[in-house]
Amino acid sequence: MNKKRLILVGATGSIGRQTLEAVASFPGRFEVVALAAGRNARALLDAARAWPEARLCLADPHTEPDAAEAASDAIVYRGEAGLDTLIRDTEADLVVNGAAGAAGLVPSLAALESGKDLALANKESVVMAFGLLKTAAEKHGRAIIPIDSEHAALFQLVRRIGVDEIEELCITASGGAFRDRPLADLASVRPDEAAAHPNWQMGRKISIDSATMANKGLEVIEAARLFGFTPDRVKVLIHPQSLVHALVRARDASLYANISEADMRIPILNALSWPESLASPFGRLELAGRSLEFRAVDPARYPLLGLAYEALAHGEGATVAYNAADEVAVAAFERGELGFLGIARVVEATLRAPWPRHLATLTEVRAADHEARRRAASAVKEL
Ligand code: MG
């Protein structure tokens, strides 16, 4: 059997490391032909040790000084343009995109436009430019396979049950670090507390986004677009154990759930092997002795979730603005320039501008993103 050739973007992050683990547990099945990281040259070279033939890229131009020498001449591709070229020029079957934030958009587009399948952990790509991704995927007959745990779960449920049988989608949320904190305490919580996610080991920004539920907001947008459901047919349920990742309600009123341990290697392996499936060595869940609990979301505790539905209803410009404003606000919170509750206020203020319903080109997406960051930065100063 031919090995499936993979390009891994975000190789040194949480998704990237777990992808390399999943690949290593099926020797002979996959071949990593290129690896890209943001700025950590040392970690990239470490990751590349098992794949000496792989092409390497550092996508962030601000490389750490001591790492620059360690990089020597092994890292040929540099910067966002280098990453774009690497993906387009390297022969591969699948691009795994585990990049963080808006930086994930360029590699997603490059993958589909150069005729490769896209295994997508970067939800910002969908939130910012799903229209462009979909057009590219259809033109080249390629698939977008979600890796985000809830969407990977929905992907499995939808393909098994059939989209026409499904009335609504439901994604679960842990509720983040402050799920059980008194509301009155939230004004004074610190970034380190917000970044302590109860169930998943993830990057810092996404853990803070779990505490505000901006992450779930982005995921609602992602689910609606990936599966073609209107906002009112996408629901969110708090589930503190993070064992049920998503549910679908069928027309006959049955609920179907996707349940497994909270182990990202399961959705990663499913995405790597799609459309086949492999027997997973990861995270087999025994339900005996476990309890599953569900609660409704309190809108007063998580205003960023409601704002995501508003942005989704308003269109593509507004969802770009939602994402950009949240990135700016979380960075300001991390620097101590903004309180935790200020994050939602910055996003709300940014969404008030008249954002376009449709963004037809990458240039338009970038312009909306830029404008939203400018507005969000001035909202941070005014709060
Ligand atoms: Mg998720």
Image (cartoon, rainbow, N blue to C red):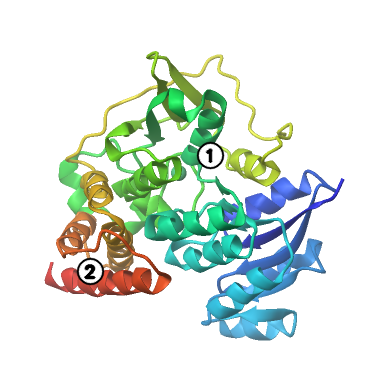
**Where residue 222 sits: x, y (%)?**
40, 47
Q: Position of residue 113 (x, y in %)?
A: 58, 64
Residue at the left extreme, as displayed: 382
Label 2 vs label 1, nearer the camera? 1
Q: Which residue is mark 1?
A: 152
Q: Which residue of the protein is positioned furthest toward the front in this rendering?
A: 139
What residue appears at the point 38 percent right and 18 percent down from the top-left corner? Answer: 251
Residue that appears at 82% across and 69% down: 53
Q: Which mark is residue 212?
A: none
Name the kind of residue labelled 1 in the image: Ala
User: How dense is the environment of label 2, judged by Cα within 10 Å: few (below 14), some, or many (20 and up)?
Assistant: many
Mark 2 sits on what residue?
376
Above or below, comparing residue 48 to residue 173 in the picture: below
The front one of 94 and 333 is 94
Q: Quadrant of ligand 1?
A: top left
In front: 247, or 381? 247
The C terminus - image quarter: bottom left
Disc 1 element: helix
Q: Residue at x 41, y 56 (%)?
A: 131
Q: Amino acid at mark 2?
A: Ala
The answer to whether residue 188 is left or right of residue 69 is left
Which quarter of the rendering shows the N terminus? top right
Describe the element under mark 2 as helix, strand or loop: helix
How far across and down, in percent of the image, does residue 171 sit?
40, 34
Viewer can see residue 239: no
